Image (tube, rainbow, N blue to C red):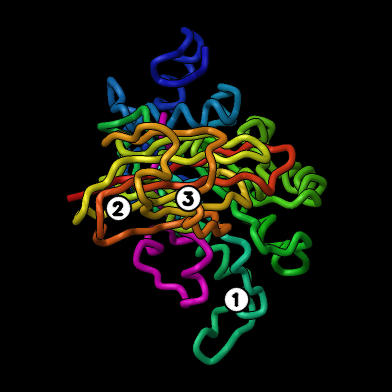
Amino acid sequence: MSGFPNDLSDTQRAALATLAQSLTPGHLQSHSLTINTPDTSLWNVDLSAVSSTSPLTSGQSVILLKFLRARDFVVADALAMLTNTLKWRKAFNVTSLASEVFPDDYASLGQVFGRERASRCPVTYNYYGGLNVDALFTSTPTNPSAGPDQFVRWRVQLMESAMSQLDLNSDPEVEAVMQVHDYAGASMRPAGAMRDATKQIIALFADNYPECLSRKLFVNVPAVMESLFSVISVFSPAKTRAKFRMIGAGRTREALWEWIDPTEVPDRYGKFDAGDKHKIQDVGVGARSTVVVWRKVSKGQSVRWKVVTGGLDVGVAGGVAKEALAEGPVGAEPVVIKGGKVPKEADVKRGEIVDGKVEKVDDDGVAYLVLDNGYSVLTSKVVKYVFEVEG
């Protein structure tokens, strides 16, 4: 049995009941935790009366089972871990983080955005390429608190922001967070205070956010990161490491699409508008080949396109041409020609995220969209696009 609320063995169910009965008001108060206050609440679930609550609420069951799974259903160990988490949250003053304001330097370092497709878990993003350690860790008159401790508080705030999007009572099946760590432009040799802060964050999350990770993607990762990965992951439990996945720079968007709808990724990864959700098309462009999409267009209409490549170096062009240039008959619906010829008018430019529009077509003809993977000798690319004629 997995140990989740709807998949418990008799032994696991008994452990859940024992843990609940052990978390008495007296136990909590003996650890300087005040009943019926934020001291005894986790992610909007009150734990102050679990010992006398029967049956447990959905949220209470979810939280207690997180700690039991993290400690292999050894009740004494789970009770100690949960108690220590509540004590840490009080000492760290986690409840104040929701209103805590950090310097502008932190704005570009991370965000909570969108949901994982299947699980509907919220997604956090960390952008290490924008990390200016000197600016973050050097105390100034405008930021006298700058330093590793402030960075750790910001990182916990980001996690708490994601956890606050969970509703463990009304939607208990969505109980975790997906994390994306983007290393584009980042230093692969964290040292000194940053290394120590990173270790502290990993330890805090392992101790105080058990079973709160659905999966973790390390994206835009250079080859040298492979060796560093083994160093970073050693600080995480084996169950957590199993949820890690390393993604190279050429496959980042394609990997994100595997788990997240393209309308729910941040703009930097080529977010499509929600209104285009059902208009998005996929096409594979083979190595050293071209795909041309044609569709009929009438005078006065407009044409728009958005193209996001799953890999690098795909050339894109869009526009309008005379119907005679089309390869075969073209109608109102798009015609996809793999290995198609690029129209002479096409101005093919290399770009991973391309938006384009012809506001008003002068004459009847055809609209075209060129996807050129000619620079790639061995690798085919996945491309997502919206190609629409309006008016």
The answer for how far apart the CA atoms under marks 1 and 3 are is 20 Å
Q: Amino acid at mark 3?
A: Thr
Q: Quadrant of residue 127?
A: bottom right
Q: Say whether residue 29 is left or right of residue 301.
A: right
Question: Measured from the top left, where is residue 244 in percent x and y?
Answer: 64, 37
Question: Measured from the top left, where is residue 365 in percent x and y?
Answer: 30, 48
Q: Residue at x 79, y 47 (%)?
A: 231
Residue ID for mark 3? 124
Highlighted magenta segment, given as a residue range: 91-118
Sequence-wise first label, 1 or 2? 1
Q: Say whether residue 340 is left or right of residue 244.
A: left
Q: Residue at x 64, y 38 (%)?
A: 245
Q: Residue at x 57, y 78 (%)?
A: 146
Q: Amino acid at mark 1?
A: Leu
Q: Amino acid at mark 2?
A: Val
Residue ID for mark 1? 136
Mark 2 neighbour density, 10 Å: few (under 14) some (14–19) many (20 or more): many
Q: Residue furthest bottom?
A: 141
Residue ID for mark 2? 303
Tag 1, which secondary structure?
helix
Q: Residue at x 66, y 43 (%)?
A: 247
Q: Say whether residue 304 is left or right of residue 197.
A: left
**Nearest to the observer: residue 209 or residue 320:** 320
